[in-house]
Image: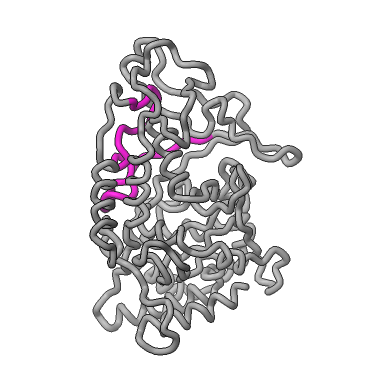
Amino acid sequence: MHRFHIVFLALTLAACSGGGPKEPQFLVAGAPGEPVPGLDPQELARFRQGEALFNKVFTPDEGIGPLFNENQCSACHTDPASGGTGDQFVTKATRFTPGTGCDLLAGAGGENVRTRSTPRLRAHGIERESIPSEATEVARFVVPFLFGLGLAEAVPTGTLEDLVDPEDADGDGISGRLARTSDGRPGRFGRKADFATLADFNAGAFFLEMGLTNPLHPGPETVDGQPLPAGVDPADDPEVSEDALRLVADYVRFLAPIARRLPTEETALSEVNRGESLFGTTGCASCHVPILETGESPVEALARKAVALYSDLLLHDLGPRITSVCGPDAAPTEHRTGILMGVGLRQRFLHHGRATSLEEAILLHGGEAQRVREAYQALPEVDRYYLIRFLQTL
């Protein structure tokens, strides 16, 4: 299945440069924080309304908390623009056993161990949540970019299913599988592919990050799984309306993917092109699929477009050096392929941010990616430099 996508990439690039097939129409990209090109006036208005809510600071009287991490979406998603990343970490705790699978410890606060509390809750001596005692895994996650996720949502499930290779038919050591959410839908968002749609992803963030109830997460809110003390949360539920959820979902849906930053000097561009070729020949592109195509969409700006995610949006087992918590359909060593679009703008790498360089991130890969890591290690030093130089342009 992976060879199919190498061919597809060649056809897509030909389409984008004016030769070969006429679809997809073009490779969509833009500046960080800008909307995708081609939105109609009503869609653009919804993008701006959603942006205002994304940047809104919520107060305790409006429902923030009483346990939370930040009081606005853009407090975390701020760099290099609204919708980007931040310095914060999210802590999760789960319990995993091979026989029974994953317990998210949602009833004990494990889905998101929140680190701040409102004055009313602090008056009861509660500053933050605790790690559940029954947890077998605890992990910290860096803040993901939100750029281009609307196009990722518009990629047909069938396209992702075509990339699955459960029996490793091509013999490259890479299988991958399409995750299922807790309710059985195909998952593609979140580090463990535990969300099916951007609406689910955003509603979960409102509740788990900010303590804001909403139609998809009506509560009840708890502290370490126990009921809240009386009077600490004066706002009526739901604290975020369905209309507000839809506006914020549209804001994220309409954020443009990040355009590549290519050098203009001929020698430097030649180095990047060499690195791009090595990205394919070493096998990196088997999981970090450079370009996916969207299908039909009610939003014309998202329909039948090419998007350079550098991800297959599938779960892969990456070995014990990149272990974390489990997910609804993911073991602790399984992660959804990271989106490399924008990786050149990051300072920390991998889901946990412990890698401080792109090379360190590559060398931590194992499991299904072990052969790829070994292929990278076998490259001459100058070729390893070219490959990293290419990644820095994404």
For the view shown, which residue lies furthest in the bottom direction?
19
Residue 235 versus residue 345 in the image, above or below: above
Q: Position of residue 208 (x, y in %)?
A: 44, 33
Q: Position of residue 36 (x, y in %)?
A: 30, 63
Q: Quadrant of the C terminus?
A: bottom left
Main SS class of the magenta portion in the image: loop
Q: Which residues are magenta?
A: 63-92
In the displayed structure, does residue 79 sit left or right of residue 249?
left
Q: Is residue 89 magenta?
A: yes
Residue 155 seen in this snapshot? yes
Residue 392 seen in this snapshot? no
In the displayed structure, does residue 267 sit left or right of residue 181?
left
The image quarter containing residue 177 is: bottom right
Q: Quadrant of the N terminus?
A: bottom right
In the displayed structure, does residue 311 sit left or right of residue 265?
right
Residue in view at x 32 percent, y 51 percent: 251
The image quarter containing residue 20 is: bottom left
